[in-house]
Image: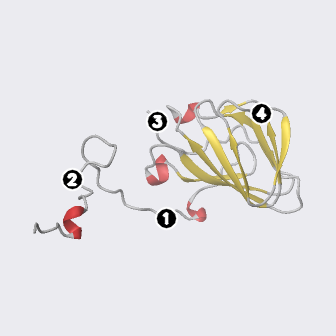
Amino acid sequence: MTAQPSRTEQQPDRQTEPRPGQPGRAQPAKPVRVVSLDEVAPNRRRGGDLRVMLSPTTVGSTCGFMGLAILAPGETISEHYHPYSEEFVHLVCGELEVDLDGVTHTLRPEQSLMVPRHMRHRFRNTGPAEARMVFQLAPLAPKPELGHVDTETPPVPDESHPDIGGGS
């Protein structure tokens, strides 16, 4: 009877064996970094308090970025679109009206939506409480400054764009 390889021998070495479906050698795992809200400066250029939490700048991501938008009652994130990315949003708390190409949709806690590339969109907190929305965009634009196109004047136009990083 032929001896069976041990469980350890059956497992590929992550640093030397190719990943399934990937040519070449697997790369060593990057160190994990936990990012806290208070580590990221707020950006108010488009309205609200936008925090880019996980990005090429903060964690070395290569395919997208994620953050948190905090909107006080009455605050708006001005209309814009993304020519290279889809945007995924999830409302944690509060209530938002979302304008997608001029059509208004209501977003309530524990609801999510996807904003397709090139679709104009704006977020408004019309409720009585703070709204917190997680957002994720992917893929990254070739250069960070190409990732957002404003279609109306932002509330704080002189503030710099959020530091996403990546691109060339």
Q: Residue at x 67, y 36 (%)?
A: 116
Give yes or no for contact between labels 3 and 2 (Cβ–Cβ under 8 Å). no
Within-10-Å neighbours for mark 2: few <14, some 14–19, many 20+: few
Q: Estimate the x, y position of residue 58 in percent, counting from the top left.
A: 48, 53
Q: Which quadrant is home to the N terminus?
A: bottom left
Residue at mark 1: 34
Q: Residue at x 77, y 60 (%)?
A: 109
Give yes or no for contact between labels 2 and 1 (Cβ–Cβ under 8 Å). no
Give yes or no for contact between labels 4 and 3 (Cβ–Cβ under 8 Å). no
Q: In the drawing, what numbered circle is on residue 70?
A: none
Point out the tag, 2 or 1, that comes first from the N-terminus. Answer: 2
Q: Estimate the x, y position of residue 33 in percent, counting from the top left.
A: 44, 62
Within-10-Å neighbours for mark 4: few <14, some 14–19, many 20+: few
User: In this image, 43 relative to 152: left or right?
Assistant: left
Residue at mark 4: 153
Q: Residue at x 29, y 50 (%)?
A: 27
**Depicted 71 relative to depicted 8: above or below:** above
Q: In the drawing, what numbered circle is on residue 16?
A: 2
Give yes or no for contact between labels 4 and 2 (Cβ–Cβ under 8 Å). no
User: In this image, 41 relative to 111: left or right?
Assistant: left
Point out the tag, 4 or 2, that comes first from the N-terminus. Answer: 2
Give yes or no for contact between labels 4 and 1 (Cβ–Cβ under 8 Å). no
Point out the tag, 4 or 1, that comes first from the N-terminus. Answer: 1
Q: Estimate the x, y position of residue 131 in percent, counting from the top left.
A: 78, 59
Q: Quadrant of residue 70?
A: bottom right
- Disc 1 versus disc 3: distance between alpha carbons? 23 Å
Residue at mark 3: 167
- Dot 4: what SS? loop
